[in-house]
Image: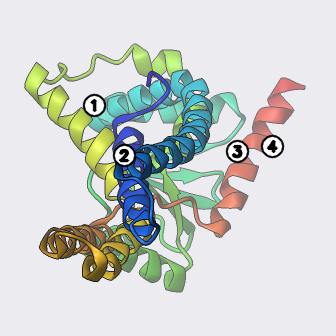
Amino acid sequence: MKNLNLASLFNLIILFFGVLVVSLILFTLLKLNLIFKIVLSAALAVIVLYFAYRRESRYFLQTKADAAAKGRLNEGMHILNTCALDEILPIFLEFFSQNNICAKAHKRYLLVNDDFCLYLGLYVDPLTEFVTKSIIDNNPFSGKRLVIVSNCFSEATLSLCAVKDITLVPTKELVPLINFDKLQSIPTVKGNTLMQRIRQIFTKQFLSKLYARKNFKRFFVYGVILFLLSPVSFYPVYYIVSGGIFIVNGLIALLFGKIDVPPTKESAWFFDAILSNQNKNAT
């Protein structure tokens, strides 16, 4: 089980017992020995579990292969999120200077190549529509194409920026372009306590993946199957209660599940502008 995370292990356990229970109920329609029914159901559950485990472990190994790069990215984002602006701003200015891009700063706003205005939001929480309107109103480089960098964005912000023709760039997409050694040289805020780290791991690695928006269908399917099987089961109340729990969890995942917001399609020009200058420098 080394090749599985907690969420995948939890899903496999549910799958195993789900197949086992369904098989037992279906085999009750056949006139077979009870022990033979149990053995046959267990064998079927193990076979399904084996193929599901292979699929989950393959996915986990692919994810694990990128763990070093992801850890580097998370560390870079942590530095950007915890350090003062006057410590981060010189790194961005130096980055643009090294790539022959003219940039001048005014607070969190950077006028880049007299072409577009880059706002360094770097907010941990999703960027709200209210804050976005404040960014637009206080822009000292009005008339220039606005690019906002932040960790994530609310749906209202996405809609507003689509109308206003504002480019949104997640911080994680920008961090790999910055000199990582420069970021590491910045003194960061002290790490969290052991209990805070455990809480963060439980929240990010387990709950956030278990209740991801894409998992709501799985919860609903499990719940509906249990409801449908309750009339032919020995203990229908348990099936109805369990089905209700799965459906409630499905609603939680649907309403509150996290969705990773990728860069908007319009942000491609921003990265093309930077990368093209990097390529010119390399040659």
Badge 1 vs badge 2, beta-carbon distance below 8 Å: no
The residue carrying mark 3 is 274
187 and 108: which is toward the camera: 187
Residue 6 higher or lower than 195, as above or below: below
The answer to whether residue 214 shows anywhere in this view is: yes
Left or right of residue 14, residue 93 in this image:
right
For label 3, the SS is helix
59 and 205: which is toward the camera: 59
N-terminal of the pair, mark 2 or mark 4, is 2
Q: Residues within 10 Å of mark 4 (few under 14, many from 20)?
A: few
Rendered location of residue 120, percent (x, y): 41, 50
For label 4, the SS is helix
For label 2, the SS is helix
Three-letter code for the amino acid on which mark 4 is drawn:
Ser
The residue carrying mark 4 is 276
Rendered location of residue 272, percent (x, y): 75, 51
The residue carrying mark 2 is 35
Image quarter in which the N terminus is found = top left
N-terminal of the pair, mark 4 or mark 1, is 1
Which dot, 2 or 4, sits closer to the camera?
A: 2
The residue carrying mark 1 is 83
For label 1, the SS is loop
Distance between the alpha carbons at the discs numbered 3 and 4: 5 Å
125 and 101: which is toward the camera: 125
Can you tell which quarter of the image residue 125 is in? bottom left
Q: Residues within 10 Å of mark 1 (few under 14, many from 20)?
A: some
Badge 3 vs badge 4, beta-carbon distance below 8 Å: yes
Residue that appears at 85% across and 34% down: 280
Distance between the alpha carbons at the discs numbered 4 and 1: 29 Å
Badge 3 vs badge 1, beta-carbon distance below 8 Å: no
Three-letter code for the amino acid on which mark 3 is drawn:
Ile
